[in-house]
Amino acid sequence: MSDLTQSQTVIEIDVRDAEGRVLQRYQLADDGDYIIGRDREIAHILIDDKSVSRRHAVLRRKGDRLALADVGSLNGTLIAPTSERAGARETTDGWQDWPRDAYATIGLFSLYWRADAMIAEAGDGDDQASPVITTLGADRGVEATSDEQGAEADASGAATDLTQLFATTELVPFSQLLATAEKLDIPVETKDYLCIGGGMGSFMFVDHLRIVGVSAQAIRVIGVDPDPVRKWADYCQNSQIPAHERIRSHSASTPDNIWGFPGYALRETWQRVRAGRRDALEPVLRVFGEPLFAETYTPRLGDVLASVSREAQRIGWQGMVRCGRAIALRKLDDGRYALHFRTPLQPGQGEETTRDWICIARHVHIATGYPAIRVLTVLQDYRRRHSDDPSVVNAYEPHDELYRMLEKRGGTVLVEGRGIVASRILQRLGELHQRNPTIRIVHLMRYPVTSGHRSDLARRPVRHHVEVQPFNWPKACWGGALQQRLERADSAKRSEWMDVWGGTTTADRKNWRVMLAEGTRQGWYQPVFGDLIKVRRRDGQLALTIQPPKHASRQTISADALIDCTGLVADVTTSAFLRDLIDTHALPRNRAAGTGPERGMSGLRVTNAFEVKALRTGSGRVYAAGIITANGPYAAVDSFLGLSFAALRAIDDLVHSRTAGLRRFGPLASVRQWIKWCRGVSP
Amino acid sequence: MTPTLLGRWQTRLVLFLVIVSPVTLVASWLLGKSGGLSAEPFGLAAAMLLTGLVFEAIAQQLQRFRWDQDWPFALFVGQAVCEFWVAFVAIRLDFVPGLEACDLARIDRVSRQIACVDYALPIGPAMVQAAVIIALSLVFVTGVAPVLFPRWRYRGGQFSGFHRRD
């Protein structure tokens, strides 16, 4: 801490967004209670976002200690515990002790003690704006704002050394790293395999590793949540897929089982047989007849989640994962890699407890997933002006409140977007319409679609102005002729084809077709075409200005709510960790075509075996998987089957490179492991 | 399934080895008189293999009309049924040149008792044999192959030559 803060005993709190960027900095000058929330009138620590309640939590400063109390927020307040001691935290009277090195979660944001904040910033690069600093005094008034003070304050201290070590050279000398770590008291652990991300991509790679014979002790996973399926499950639940509903995934796309057998359809049939149901054979018959004689079988969300939890337990996931954020990855001079990561503190160990870690590994896997939820600029503007408005939401955010309001009061909802999430939101609204017939749906799509894309000799069908295909890519992209073509093509051809095969599509489900046809006939569903260019609030309603395609004149629609279903951001530079990696190692990226928001900014370039070749050093290898490899040699990277493919491909590549001492996973080993899976015993 | 042409052919040959051959042997043994082997099931199996290799090429072209470029299980079975009838009729009408000679020559070595040159091929046993082959093939491609060969389903049914290193 600087002299300034010490002499005034100011505690500084950073407000960080989901990507770790510091948005605001608050200096707490005095003891007392500070309200955290998004209501400008009452909040001292203001977080202007829908994920934060108006009066979310109270922060209490007493001397050098901080404590937090949730005050009935919608999304809760959490002092993040570490994986080892999860649940060991003690609370009294609703107050949670907030040690210096733990962070607090407020909606989608995190609050850090200032000292904890330094390292992440160093990795964020130059283009990050300095945070606004607000000093809260005894009267809780704003005393001063400054951009420079805070930046000066972290010029000294332990973290800077590590930052310097990581910033000055591309190959970090191993001995120097050890010396620095010892000096700064940063623990260093060495593993054979290091997986960064901790979500489904990491999980499926680790699952394959364990099954081909790597022990759990040789693997370290760094993830934001100890549960590999958490982030994906949250997206599903927010976009209105309850556990009993079906997801857009194939029966044989089994994240818990590397063979795809038994698939979810066979398992569901077995469940039904045991329950003595007469329709027990329906799931497997559907797989047999799909998509010609039956609608494509899709598994239930709840079944998928349960199966992943089971497999996580079987392979010992809990012992491998450590909750934390990856800060920076560097090549070492001995042909390995060093990851600097930061974990929340174990409570009750005092101020000395270390929160920075180094993990050294020869083989690294990166699967950090979608960096962010995409919020359209026009909606960002609106939210900035009307932070308390629960009627304007993104489909991937929690927004159950909106449906409760609609069911009670009725009204017009504008749904924007035409993908699978839009379909699911429309279904939810259609169900609400049954209960409250005054609900009307205006469906905004950018342009009308009457005939689908062509590829080879086929044309993609269109239903209600949306192109439909069972999954988000044509099936042959997962392991057929289209995948083979893609793997052998150059980057220009790849982006051209993927633009045709992918795009925004939905599934052709009969209940959706019937609902939209009925809604159109009865007048409560209406498609509208154009771009949303302005959102205002007028006479207690939303006034939405829409620019139709082809320079037609603008129109304004009144609505009571707006649900934006335009998706998630796949731009890798949105993640501070990836941006640092790309900048430091000059990583090449894939071209992206198309007209969507991801145009020109796509995934990391990987080989056909998913290696990030630009990061190769000595016998060390870095592989990537998931959406961060978008527009590369494989189209369906953001799917369970795609992640499974990427994992197997990367491991086969490791076997081939002879750097990992892995044996090829042949038929005998495969059958042996499959039997172990069936028995539910550890691989 | 989303097979490539090479995948179709390779899978077909593997199916011939692990499903068709044993089933045919059993059928031949069951139909054989006085403990010997019957030639007809082998004739049918060989004719179905030849028809199948041609049908796979046709099916692969038809598959291009499908947006997903896939070959659903229903079509897999439908295709096999068509192959059976074509093979059956071809044998009955003696349209498969050289089949009897080469087939019987092989069987003669296995069992000296068979010298059957006249190809009767009764429909009942032929249908049972084909049905068992088709059913077991379906079990193989849906359950057995993925467990034995975890990469097979990602390679359009190919056992080798699908991927290219870069």
Image (cartoon, coloured by chain):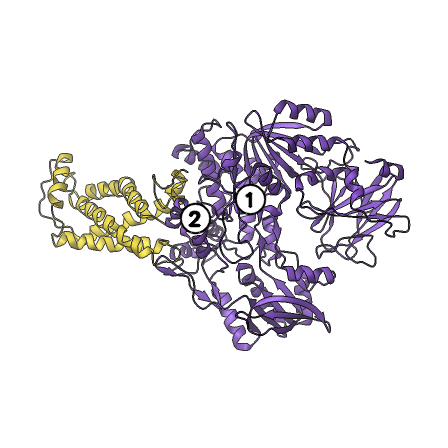
Instruction: Mark 1: give few (<14), some (14-19) or many (20+) Cα within 10 Å.
Output: many
- Residue pushed farthest right? A138
Quadrant of image for the N terminus of chain A = top right
Chain letter of disc 1 in the image: A
**Residue in the image at 24% along x and 48% along y:** B53
Q: Is residue A356 above or below residue A437?
A: above
Q: Which chain is yellow?
A: B
Compared with B70, A13 (above or below) is: above
Q: Position of residue A251 (x, y in %)?
A: 46, 51
Reading the chain from its start, which is encountered first: label 1 or label 2? Answer: 1
Q: Which residue is mark 1?
A: A200
Instruction: Give the quarter of the image for residue A185.
Output: top right
Q: Which residue is mark 2?
A: A478
Point out the frontmost of discs 1 and 2: 2
Residue A431, located in which quarter of the rendered image? bottom right
Spatial distance from mark 1 to mark 2, Cα to Cα? Answer: 17 Å
Q: Position of residue A353 (x, y in %)?
A: 75, 31
Residue A97 is at least partly visible in this image: no
Q: In front: A349, or A43?
A: A43
Q: Please state which of residues A680 and A618 is positioned toward the viewer in this rendering.
A: A618
Percent across and percent down for residue A245 are 55, 57
Residue at disc 2, secondary structure: helix
Q: Residues within 10 Å of mark 2 (few under 14, many from 20)?
A: many
